[in-house]
């Protein structure tokens, strides 16, 4: 290979590296703007996502009018403490109903979540967990079943659209949603 061909190859490799870094930087920048799996459940009323940073929480408050957060994360985790402090600084109402990552829950925890999400006088609310999949899917499923009267199959399909992998360890989540669907159909709550 000639010296000039070697130089052109090095320039091409360097240019490819710069472009790859720039593309990755753009993806990183875009990913930091919004929480993972952020989406409206009912625009102007209820939103869902994965874990939120203080900057993301500020942006959601400004751009979507979020005035209340329902966190499903461990109450003692450092990310939860940071989020709680950020919510207080922003003047947001903040609630915590800690659930394990697989979305397992008790009837009392589900009642607490549903009371928060179904309150017709609630300000625009964000419900979230770490990934925005299992715990958040359970919470949104409760809302869909009891407030929007979705059938269980539609709730489960939405869970999968948001990354639910439906493994054996999710049996509690599936049973909880089935029990809630039956309760919603009968007009009763456990």
Image (tube, grey):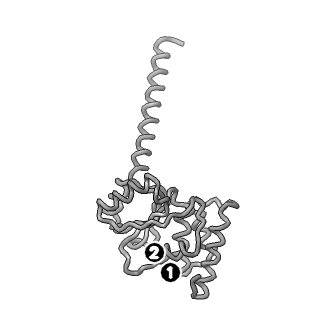
Q: Secondary structure at mark 1?
A: loop
142 versus 76 height, above or below: below
At a point 55% along the width and 66% down the height, the residue shown is 137
Give coordinates of residue 22: x percent, y percent: 41, 37
At a point 56% along the width and 68% down the height, the residue shown is 138
Foreground tag (2 vs 1): 2
Q: Quadrant of the C terminus?
A: bottom right
Q: Secondary structure at mark 2?
A: helix
Quarter of the rendering containing residue 107 = bottom right
Tag of residue 155: none
128 versus 43 height, above or below: above
Q: Is residue 104 left or right of residue 6?
A: right
At a point 34% along the width and 61% down the height, the residue shown is 87
**Within 10 angstroms of label 1, few (less than 14), some, or many (20 or more) residues?**
some
Tag of residue 117: 2
Give coordinates of residue 94: x percent, y percent: 38, 66
Residue at far top of view: 2
- Front-lying residue, 39 or 75: 75
20 versus 41 height, above or below: above
Q: How many marks?
A: 2
At a point 57% along the width and 62% down the height, the residue shown is 134
Residue at far bottom of view: 187
**Label 2 with label 1: CB-CB less than 8 Å:** yes
Residue topped by disc 1? 147
Tell me how far mark 2 sits from mark 1, CA to CA.
9 Å
Q: Quadrant of the N terminus?
A: top right
Residue at far right of view: 168
Q: Earlier along the polypeptide chain: callout 2 or callout 1?
A: 2
- Front-lying residue, 168 or 166: 168
**Within 10 angstroms of label 2, few (less than 14), some, or many (20 or more) residues?**
many
């Amino acid at each position: 290979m000639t010296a000039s061909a070697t130089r052109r190859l090095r320039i091409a490799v360097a240019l490819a590296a710069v472009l790859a870094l720039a593309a990755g930087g753009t993806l990183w920048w875009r990913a930091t703007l919004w929480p993972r799996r952020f989406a409206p459940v009912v625009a102007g009323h209820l939103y869902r996502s994965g874990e939120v940073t203080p900057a993301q929480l500020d942006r959601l408050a400004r751009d979507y009018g979020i005035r209340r957060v329902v966190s499903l994360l461990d109450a003692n985790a450092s990310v939860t403490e940071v989020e709680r402090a950020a919510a207080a600084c922003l003047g947001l109402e903040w609630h915590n109903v800690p659930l394990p990552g697989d979305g397992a829950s008790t009837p009392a925890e589900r009642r607490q979540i549903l009371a928060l999400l179904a309150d017709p006088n609630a300000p625009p609310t964000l419900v979230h967990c770490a990934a925005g999949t299992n715990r958040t899917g359970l919470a949104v499923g409760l809302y869909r079943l009891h407030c929007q009267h979705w059938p269980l199959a539609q709730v489960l399909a939405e869970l999968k659209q948001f990354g639910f992998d439906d493994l054996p360890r999710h049996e509690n989540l599936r049973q909880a949603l089935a029990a809630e669907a039956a309760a919603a159909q009968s007009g009763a709550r456990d």
